[in-house]
Amino acid sequence: MPSTTKPAPIWHPSPNFGPRRDGLTPTLIVLHYTAMDSAQAALERLCDPQAEVSAHYLIGSDGMLWQMVREEDRAWHAGAGEWHGQTDINSRSIGIELDNTGAHPFSDLQMATLETLLPQIMSRWAIPPEGLIGHSDMAPGRKSDPGAKFDWQRLERQGLAAKRGTETAPVGISYDNFRTLARAAGFTADVPNETLLSAIRLRYRPWGIGPLAPADFKALSPASRTT
Ligand SMILES: [Zn+2]
């Protein structure tokens, strides 16, 4: 289980935020990688008014935690996209940037800080494990972070991310059936079949290649969301 010790975030305010719209409060947490060479470089960019991007938190590869935007406010990290049929994800979420280029594994120190931070956010806003998503989940094709190197199953085991299904594939291996399962899991963005498949593989089986296969249905099976 995650430690109950609170990491003290280093307050490094970004000017890039606004009020959440329509009185919305966070119901999602969106994970990102920075795709930059260092946490310092990411911090500068996320606080640069010219860049017009931000996130609530940044976690360095050494586990260092910065906070740039108050959780009450709307940070600019998600952009265009959709999850469970809902848009304006920035108004509905907390954004966490992980210092990683996308090409290498996430360090244990970094994961440990994330695993301490997540339960605190989830408890403050009553966000269930199902509310933790990747940027690529809500913006299939447009975004690919936190990417193939991110260990979702590590978070699933701790109850910090929705558990994946374990059922074998349904009878019909068709994109119609695949899209139905995907929509029920939250992947509602209107994208081509192959783009959707790529996004779902990024989350559940990044080693998957080739055409739609029975294994692609497994993680999305309804059993994954009954517990
Ligand atoms: Zn991102």
Image: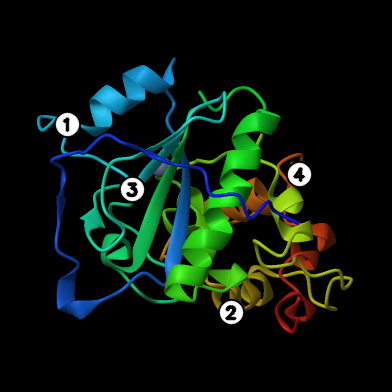
Report which residue position mark 3 lands on. Answer: 56
Decide which of tag 2 and tag 4 comes sooner along the chain.
Answer: 2
The answer to which of 91 and 206 lies nearer the viewer is 91
- Find the distance from the CA under tag 2 to the CA under tag 4: 21 Å
Image quarter where the C terminus lies is: bottom right
Please tell me which residue is depicted at 44% across the width and 66% down the height of the picture.
28
- Find the distance from the CA under tag 3 to the CA under tag 2: 28 Å
* Label 3 vs label 1, nearer the camera: 3
* Label 1 vs label 2, nearer the camera: 1
The label shown at residue 94 is none
Mark 3 near mark 1, Cβ–Cβ under 8 Å?
Answer: no
Badge 4: few (under 14), some or many (20 or more) residues near its Cα, within 10 Å? some
Please tell me which residue is depicted at 26% across the width and 66% down the height of the picture.
91
Report which residue position mark 4 lands on. Answer: 208
Name the amino acid, label 4: Gly
**Secondary structure at numbered mark 4:** loop
Report which residue position mark 2 lands on. Answer: 184
Badge 1: few (under 14), some or many (20 or more) residues near its Cα, within 10 Å? few
Please tell me in which quarter of the rendered image ligand 1 is found: top left
**Residue 54 left/right relative to 163:** left
Name the amino acid, label 1: Ala
* Label 3 vs label 2, nearer the camera: 3
Q: Residue furthest top?
A: 37
- Find the distance from the CA under tag 1 to the CA under tag 4: 35 Å
Give the image location of residue 113, x and y in percent.
58, 41
Please tell me which residue is depicted at 19% across the width and 67% down the height of the picture.
20
Mark 3 near mark 2, Cβ–Cβ under 8 Å?
Answer: no
Name the amino acid, label 2: Ala
Give the image location of residue 12, x and y in percent.
26, 34
